[in-house]
Each structure stands twice: as C-alpha cells, then as structure tokens.
Image: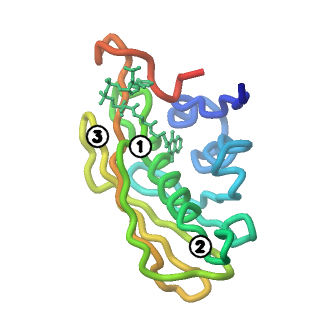
C-alpha cells in the first residue's frame, strides 16, 4: 500500500493553528503530494481568492510535446481546493472536488503558468470556484476552469462520517 503523508491537517492549515501566514502554510502542506511534485507555488491566498503558478518543466508536458492539460487542471483544481480551505463556512471541516470543467483556449510552451481563482458561490453545502489560467510568457489566457467543491461536516451535523481530509 502506498504511504501518503497526511500533510493536509486541513483545519489547522485554515485556522492558523500553525505559525506563519496562510499562504506559507499552504505551500508547506503540499510537500510530497501531487501539487508539490508539480512544483506549484502559491503567492497569495485569502477568503474567496487565491493566486499561484508553476514554471514549465519537462514533467508538465504530454508525451508528444504539448503542455499537458492535466497539469493545467491540477493547478486550477488545487487553487480552488486551497481557496475553498481558506473560505470554509463555520462548522465545515473539509471539502472535496465534486465536479470540474475546463476550456483549453490557448497554448503555453515555456516560462510560467499562472492561475487566479475566485469564489463565485459560497453556499452551506457547496462552493463554486472560477479560475483563469494564463501563460506568463505571452500574457494570454490559456484555460478557463470552473469547479464545485463539496463541503464536508462532522458526523453529528451531517449524520455521516468523518471528513474526506481526515481519511487516513
Ligand atoms: C462529494 C461526496 C462527499 C458526496 O457524497 P454523497 O452525499 O453524494 O454520496 P454518499 O454519502 O453516498 O457517498 C458516496 C461515496 O463518497 C465517499 N464519501 C462520502 N462522504 C465521505 C466522507 N465524508 N469522507 C470520505 N469519503 C466520503 C464514499 O466513497 C462514499 O461511498 P460509500 O460506499 O462509502 O458510501 C462524495 O461523492 C465523494 O466523496 N466523492 C469523491 C470526492 C473526491 O474524492 N474528489 C476528488 C478528490 S479531492 C481533490 O481532488 C482535491 C483537490 C484539490 O485541489 C485539493 C487541494 C487542496 C487540498 C485537498 C485537495 C483535494 O482533496
């Protein structure tokens, strides 16, 4: 069985139980997991918004030489996940991506890829996030992304089980 370090002590990251600004706690939390392996960097994070980037490297490409769409989706989904974490309503203890959609409308081959995400619906059970992904080399938008984050509550409120982020 693959051992995955539980770096996502979700509530602690969001609640500021650890030291340092939120964006630093987010960057530290991803070490060894997919966003860390893809070298995502988070520059700003707060309630309702987040901004991040990666520098294009060989690992971000498809086998036939295009920047892999999954690299872009991973950046945008991670932005919205961490953004959701920074924007949980009272009582919510976790979240999971429920659905996502991406329009790929341009290409990037070198330089950086940036992502800005914002909360467009803050519900009790769902959040809808929009993200715009740009090539830093050209300034052009290369993808538009939207997802729904499902908000998870403790068993006593939801009548269910522990939050996704607390799965071992
Ligand atoms: C979204 C759901 C929780 C909704 O469940 P629903 O109410 O529709 O249905 P059920 O209650 O019947 O559950 C069905 C099924 O879902 C799993 N499940 C449900 N609740 C939980 C829970 N609290 N904890 C763990 N697992 C749960 C379970 O397998 C249930 O089947 P059973 O046979 O056990 O009944 C649910 O649909 C769901 O959990 N879907 C999967 C969501 C998911 O895994 N999304 C992708 C992974 S999360 C992710 O991608 C992610 C992205 C990021 O960018 C992040 C960034 C930063 C931090 C974390 C990130 C992150 O996690």
**Mark 3 → mark 1, Cα distance in angstroms:** 10 Å
Residue at horizontal 59 percent and vertical 50 percent from the top: 23
**Residue 116's spot in the image, x, y percent?**
46, 66
How many marks are shown on the rendered structure? 3
Residue 15 lies, in percent from the top left, at 51, 32
Foreground residue among 50 and 54: 54
Q: Does mark 1's beta carbon lie closer than 8 Å to ligand 1?
A: yes
The mark nearer the N terminus, 1 or 2, is 1
**134 sits to left or right of 34:** left
Question: What residue is shown with label 3?
Answer: 126
- Apparent side of residue 39 relative to residue 154 in the rendered image (left or right): right
Residue at which label 2 appears: 113
Residues packed near mark 3 inside 10 Å, few (<14), some (14 to 19) or many (20 plus): some
Q: Which of pointers 3 and 1 indicates the residue nearer the eye? A: 1
Quarter where residue 100 is shown: bottom left
Screen quadrant of the N terminus: top right
**Where in the figure is residue 49, as x and y percent of width and height?**
42, 57
Tell me the element at label 2. Answer: strand
Identify the residue under disc 1.
97
136 relative to 115 in the view: left or right: right
Under circle 1, the secondary element is: strand
Q: Which residue lies most toward the bottom here?
A: 138
């Amino acid at each position: 069985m693959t051992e995955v370090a539980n770096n996502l002590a979700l509530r602690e990251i969001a609640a500021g139980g650890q030291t340092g600004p939120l964006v630093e706690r987010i960057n530290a939390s991803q070490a060894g997991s997919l966003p860390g392996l893809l070298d995502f960097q988070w520059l700003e994070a707060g309630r309702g918004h987040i901004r991040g980037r990666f520098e294009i490297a060989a690992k971000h490409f498809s086998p036939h030489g295009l920047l892999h769409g999954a690299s872009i989706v991973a950046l945008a989904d991670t932005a919205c996940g961490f953004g959701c974490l920074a924007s949980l309503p009272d009582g919510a203890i976790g979240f999971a991506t429920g659905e996502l959609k991406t329009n790929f409308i341009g290409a990037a081959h070198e330089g950086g890829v940036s992502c800005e995400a914002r909360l467009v619906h803050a519900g009790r059970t769902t959040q809808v996030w929009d993200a715009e992904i740009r090539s830093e080399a050209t300034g052009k938008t290369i993808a538009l992304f939207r997802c729904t984050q499902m908000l998870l509550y403790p068993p006593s409120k939801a009548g269910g089980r522990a939050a996704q982020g607390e799965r071992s």
